[in-house]
């Protein structure tokens, strides 16, 4: 599974709270810190995408 963040991110930090092993806060928006989501973090990444208020997290 791959994940990316669109520029519509509002930097609310919910993704970092849900899955700090995958997301971190950048200077303007959240950032993905791994190229492939390890299987043990897939559920947390999906939760982060579901909780994103602007649907900026894209799961591929």
Image (cartoon, helix red, strand yellow):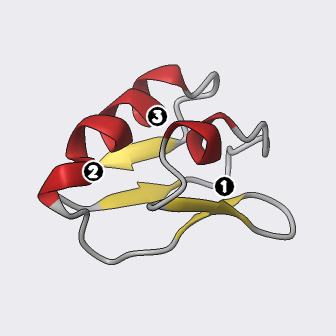
Image quadrant assignment for residue 39: bottom left
Image spot of residue 46 (x, y percent): 31, 34
Q: Is residue 55 left or right of residue 10?
A: left
- For label 1, count other residues whose C-alpha is less than 10 Å away and answer few (under 14), some (14-19) or many (20+): few
Q: Secondary structure at mark 1?
A: loop
Alpha-carbon span between mark 2 and mark 3: 11 Å
> Please, what secondary structure does the residue beneath circle 2 have?
helix
Q: Residue at x 78, y 46 (%)?
A: 11
Q: Earlier in the sequence, mark 1 or mark 2?
A: 1
Position of residue 8 relative to residue 14, above or below, is below
Q: Is residue 10 above or below residue 30?
A: above
Q: Going 76% across and 68% down the picture, which residue do you hit?
A: 26
Q: How far from the left and from the top, in percent, is residue 47?
A: 38, 28
Q: Which residue is mark 3?
A: 48
- The image position of residue 33, as x and y in percent, is 49, 74
Callout 1 touching callout 2 (CB < 8 Å): no
Callout 2 touching callout 3 (CB < 8 Å): no
Q: Quadrant of residue 2?
A: bottom left
Q: Nearer the viewer, mark 1 or mark 2?
A: 2
Q: Secondary structure at mark 3?
A: helix
Name which of mark 1 and mark 3 comes first in the sequence: 1
- Which label belongs to residue 41? 2
Left or right, 21 with reference to 7: left
Q: How many marks?
A: 3
Q: Can residue 29 be seen?
A: yes
The residue shown at (52%, 30%) is 55
Alpha-carbon span between mark 1 and mark 3: 16 Å
Badge 2 local density, few (<14 within 10 Å), some, or many (20+)? some
Extreme residue toward the right, this view? 27
């Amino acid at each position: 599974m791959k994940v990316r963040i669109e520029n519509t991110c509002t930097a609310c930090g919910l993704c970092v709270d849900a899955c700090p092993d995958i997301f971190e806060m950048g200077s303007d928006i959240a950032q993905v810190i791994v190229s492939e989501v390890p299987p043990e973090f897939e559920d947390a990444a999906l939760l982060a995408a579901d909780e994103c208020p602007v649907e900026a997290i894209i799961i591929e």
